[in-house]
Image: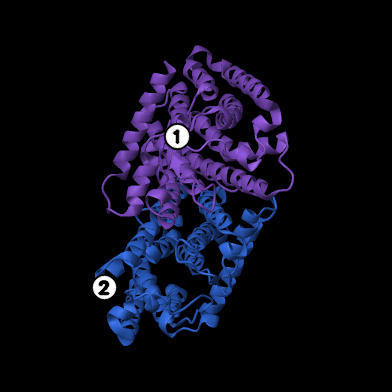
Chain colours: A purple, B blue
Amino acid sequence: MFSDALRRDAARIGAHLDKILSGGPDLPVTQGMRYAVAGGKRLRGFLVLESARLHGVDEAQAIWPAAAIEAIHAYSLVHDDLPCMDDDDLRRGLPTVHRKWDDGTAVLVGDALQALGFELVLDPGCHSDAAVRADLALSLARASGRGGMVLGQALDMAAETADVPLSLDQITELQAGKTGALIMWSAEAGARLGQADPKPLTDYAMALGLAFQIADDILDVEGDETTVGKAVGKDADRGKATFVSLLGLDGAKRRASELVAAACDALSPYGAQAQTLNEAAQFVISRDT
Amino acid sequence: MFSDALRRDAARIGAHLDKILSGGPDLPVTQGMRYAVAGGKRLRGFLVLESARLHGVDEAQAIWPAAAIEAIHAYSLVHDDLPCMDDDDLRRGLPTVHRKWDDGTAVLVGDALQALGFELVLDPGCHSDAAVRADLALSLARASGRGGMVLGQALDMAAETADVPLSLDQITELQAGKTGALIMWSAEAGARLGQADPKPLTDYAMALGLAFQIADDILDVEGDETTVGKAVGKDADRGKATFVSLLGLDGAKRRASELVAAACDALSPYGAQAQTLNEAAQFVISRDT
């Protein structure tokens, strides 16, 4: 079952991160790093492990890039929650890093988690062939940096102060960077580890990433703060363009369903082996958190 | 002459960074990235190029890690200058990134520059052997992250609120992380590119990094804000332990000279070829900026 697989993979990735982050000096930054990578669905790490399974890659190898992408994702959340960014007090139902410690600690925690992401993906345990590790790390730098996630965040920031709300094309481009780039990297990682053509997983992840963001916008309207674990209704309060404001609630749900169908179609070359990833696509639009 | 070599190398590294960062969308984050990597002595990049020359490595290759370390160094300065960190308004004589734009932009600029550092060092142009690129990138992640630069910054932050000023051993450990780790990576990079034993350069860089920091503490006492290009006298105002407060001004100058001698000794295996790096060691304790 998909939900069992997600829980099992999340636990394994968490154990790997715990092992990596155990020991060392007892400073707010090290405490904050452990805190920031704890919990969450670990959907990105799950995509790494599942796409690796599809290519017959040993989990003992795939756990490294799975932990790496969760470290990168956690860094982006810690920085995104800062008062000078989205200014959020709550994350996964708990105080954000800068609320539990302070802003300076949160900056350093995010910085250290980004470096940790590259450290993990470059660990020799990830793959015996250094060319594969270098390829994974270079694509991770591109997906997380100025051409990927940070670009999406910068477009988001520019939209906050723009006079005209974003169009559907603009918001799609923004989200392709902000959440899509790391999701795509995660799904492709298994193919890269197995030195196989990543194309089906690329197509799957493009549709999945967009569906994920549309679902996020729907949750922001329909979700309950206690269940979601973070503030809801913020986008509407700010008059920000979202997939819901642009397509309507029903239109957004329909578009999300179409994208899930497209994601599953993309995996047809893998046949029944892709069952768990197909269920994952269904999950991203039916989740309540 | 050393100062000519430093200027020439700085210009080449700047040109490489300009080329990499040209084009792309015109957003505050991309403008801020270009702004943050402009100017400066580029001592770390210089160490990469010079150590590469010692090992007969083509400059067209070495320029990649040289630009990478300058991107990583620039990221650390942009974040360090934030109001929640050191709260500095001036850097290299110009407004800091968060003063010219805003805090959120400065967070993103730093984040994107860190990713850029890894992107550059992993570029195939850096070395044809992926194992060398992966090795450089892994050591960069370690030098810049929780076991290196960020650890030093975290120790520095902890010292700000501690009841007892740091001892000489503690401040030496702090600086080995905060400034020493990137300087060491830079000096070793040439040996890594040339697949040679980095030991002489490691010893050189350990002494050089510490001398560099002692000189910084001396500049904070004796320097002129206009020449230095950033605020001076901040450490004494805060009652912070520095090499000067611990060793006295004369003692600090003596220690810095001993370290420069040790740095030069370490390069004796290279003979006259190490002339420029020996002059660089002299320079770090005689600079006025």
The residue shown at (52%, 21%) is A286
Looking at the picture, which amino acid does disc 2 mark? Leu
Q: Nearer the viewer's eye, disc 2 or disc 1?
A: 1
Q: Nearer the viewer, residue A271 or A115?
A: A115
Dot 1: chain letter:
A
Q: Residue furthest top?
A: A272
Q: Nearer the viewer, residue A222 or A172?
A: A222
Q: Nearer the viewer, residue A275 or A194?
A: A275
| For residue A282, above or below residue A113 | above
Where is residue B4, by image quadrant? bottom right
| For residue B59, above or below residue A83 | below
Q: CA distance from mark 2 to mark 1?
A: 46 Å
In the rendered image, residue A266, in percent from the top left (x then y), is placed at: 60, 20
Q: Nearer the viewer, residue B183 or A210?
A: A210
In the rendered image, residue A49, in percent from the top left (x then y), is placed at: 43, 28
Can residue B171 be seen at all in this image of the molecule?
yes
| For residue A57, above or below residue B275 | above
Check disc 2 and report its element: helix, strand or loop: helix
Q: Which mark is residue B168?
A: 2
Where is residue A218, by image quadrant? top right
Decide if residue B242 is on the left or right side of residue B105.
left
Dot 2: chain letter:
B
In the rendered image, residue B115, in percent from the top left (x then y), is placed at: 52, 50
- Answer yes or no: do the residues labelled 2 and 1 have beta carbons within 8 Å? no
In the rendered image, residue A149, in percent from the top left (x then y), is placed at: 57, 43
Check disc 1 and report its element: helix, strand or loop: loop
> Which residue was labeled with disc 1?
A229
Looking at the picture, which amino acid does disc 1 mark? Gly
The residue shown at (56%, 19%) is A267
